[in-house]
Image (tube, grey):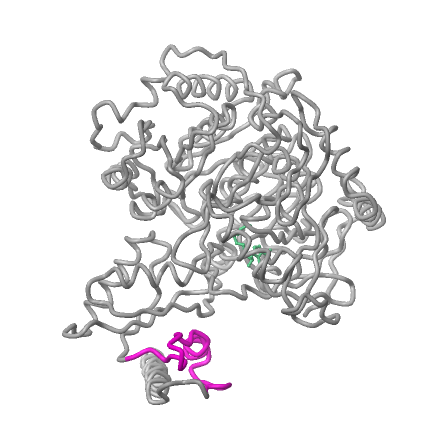
Amino acid sequence: MSTTLHSPSSAFQSAARVSGRAAYDQLYRAAETAPESFWAQLARNQLHWFQPFQRVLDWQLPRAQWFPGGLINACYNCVDRHLSSWRRNKAALIWEGENFEQRILTYQELHRKVSKFANVLKSLGYRQGDRAIIYMPMTPEAAIAMLACARLGIIHSVVFAGFSSEALKTRMEDLEANLVITADAGRRRGREIMLKRNVDAALAEYAGVRHCIVYKHLGAGIEMHHQRDLWWDDLMFGMSEDCPAEPLDSEHPLYVLYTSGTTGKPKGVVHTTAGYLLQTHMTMQWVFDLREQDIFWCTADIGWVTGHSYLIYGPLSMGATTLLYEGAPDWPEPDRFWRLIEKYRVNIFYTSPTAIRSFIRQGDAWPQKHDLSSLRLLGSVGEPINPAAWEWYYHIIGGGRCPIVDTWWQTETGAILIAPMPGAVATKPGSATLPLPGIFPAIVDAKGQPVAEGQQGFLVMRQPWPSMFRTLWRDETRFREIYWDKIPGLYFTGDAARRDADGYYWLLGRVDDVINVSGHRLSTMEVESAMVRHAAVAEAAAVGRPHEIKGQGLVVFATLKGGQAASPELVDELRDWVGKEIGGFARPDEIRLVEALPKTRSGKIMRRLLREIVTTRSVSGDTTTLEDYAVLLKLSQQGKEEEELLAHEAQKEKV
Ligand code: WT7
């Protein structure tokens, strides 16, 4: 635990929305003393309501209802309310395509497009409570589709464009989606990702969808299914621009976002309207210290929660200018991000430690070619930021002048919960620092008892917060089991953490079978299920191993069915197979074909042991329940041999 404190410069501090530590303490205490009136006041002052709420919170663990009785609309708050001021001609979205195309939508223009598209959806018969899958590249149309759904109370579920048709189908089925919004194709590192083709494959096995709306982005060759498939542009042509936002219940579901859990089946995290909006809106002020003139850039994809909260709902609800970049960070060259910052004079830049580590590898010359002096604040999300990455980010990108906000949160939490208010809380590299106002974390043991200062324990939340997810889509039982029954009475985050003498939180990674690859959550079970769907595989066990760039990499151990011979070709085939079944980002770094997997007497695969093997290449600890020591020894032996081989190879390269 490093204890180096970085205080904001006096210039930063004096201009900040929350200025000085005393101001943070005061806000935190106000929320602690009277949480309901704290949130109620913000909700009244910061959001637009069609009808005021009657109560602040109905809390029957684990069921929360925030601002019941209120009528509100997320799209109205993100778009319409800015039209009554000069902001109507402010850039809402700045989009840059991978090939340097550019589009800028003012709030007024965004309003027109969203209203028209909402009318399209209406004219096709969709309304409140319907469920739309959005499977799109990073284009303004993705944002328009999300907002149009929100306008009508159609629940959207964005599926990351890197997911396979199989993953897409699973999500459609679980959601019982009746509408799909997609594009012909998307672009990634100069390649075309054939989105519509994936949709076709998914829809061949799922019949619940009435329409598939296709935005022509690249003009890629695709097939249009008669009556089911409709072109975005044809539908928009001549459509009325008048489409009032529906007044919706505070608790109306805004979206479902699937995330990996500890089983093979992804979980549909349900977010509702008012509380979610309030907290994404407030964290734009508290954590990003947003100012009216800022250009805000969050590099996440809209397919992840970060994209929902900090590309769309948070920034737009604040009336900010949000930058949307379609492509890869290293396309056509490794300085694309720095070029974008220079070109658009970005003020606030929010990215992941994985991205930072890969930039470090490419060398300082790339950022140094560009004028990054517009930057005022840097953010980090997805995993703990290691000291080396922190230092590089601070000095090379931030020029030693920009505070770094390390933001801890989850798909389930909806908004940032633990992070510094940059003008008020001094940072320590690697720590997400202190909880935001209205957030009451604790670090406890398995029985829910607080652990001593500096000790490792489970990170939990003691009180509900407005942007918390409300349930898992059609799976209340799992919702209770995973998050609320583990340590009764407390929200179980699945993360381990420590708190130091200053009350700062240090996140230590997941405690479940979820691994974090490049800031994306991946369930080991999901990978294992994909593996055993392959005809040659009998059993599989997936584990994470530390990876220099990605944080964690994926290693899969597998046994083959009788008569199947192990070969390098089969290993390659299996890696591709997992990539196809789930999506390219889930392609394992390594697959080891073994004779047997180590198991306990009751037959459970000992993942801990496998993790140790791939991490340390040696095994220690309690193995008395092992059925077969020989298997274990063989596995660790294989690791050692590989290591020797690698050392040998490295030696050869040096010569
Ligand atoms: C998990 C949530 C929410 C944004 C992106 C990921 C890890 C997230 C941090 C951080 C240490 C972090 C946790 C968490 N995580 N941010 N600043 N420091 N760990 O969303 O896929 O829902 O994953 O990401 O392990 O539980 P997600």
Question: Is residue 131 depicted above or below 563 in this figure?
Answer: above
- Front in this rendered view, residue 206 or 537: 206
Q: Is residue 378 left or right of residue 190?
A: right
Q: Is residue 274 left or right of residue 190?
A: right
Q: Residue at x 36, y 46 (%)?
A: 162
What's the magenta region?
Answer: 596-623
Residue 174 locus on image (x, y percent):
38, 43
Q: Is residue 374 left or right of residue 539?
A: right
- Front in this rendered view, residue 93 or 61: 61
Residue 365 locus on image (x, y percent):
50, 54
Q: Quadrant of the N terminus?
A: bottom right
Q: Quadrant of the C terminus?
A: bottom left
Quarter where residue 233 is shown: top left
Question: Is residue 500 depicted above or below 313 in this figure?
Answer: below
Question: Is residue 334 depicted above or below 231 in this figure?
Answer: below
Residue 503 locus on image (x, y percent):
76, 62
Q: Residue at x 33, y 30 (%)?
A: 217
- In magenta segment, residue 599: yes
Q: Residue at x 63, y 25 (%)?
A: 71
Residue 495 locus on image (x, y percent):
58, 62
Ligand 1, image quadrant it occupies: bottom right
Q: Main secondary structure of the magenta part?
A: loop
Q: Is residue 147 visible?
A: yes
- Front in this rendered view, residue 52 or 571: 52
Q: Is residue 644 visible?
A: no
- In magenta segment, residue 56: no
Question: Is residue 8 depicted above or below 284 in this figure?
Answer: below
Q: How many marks?
A: 0
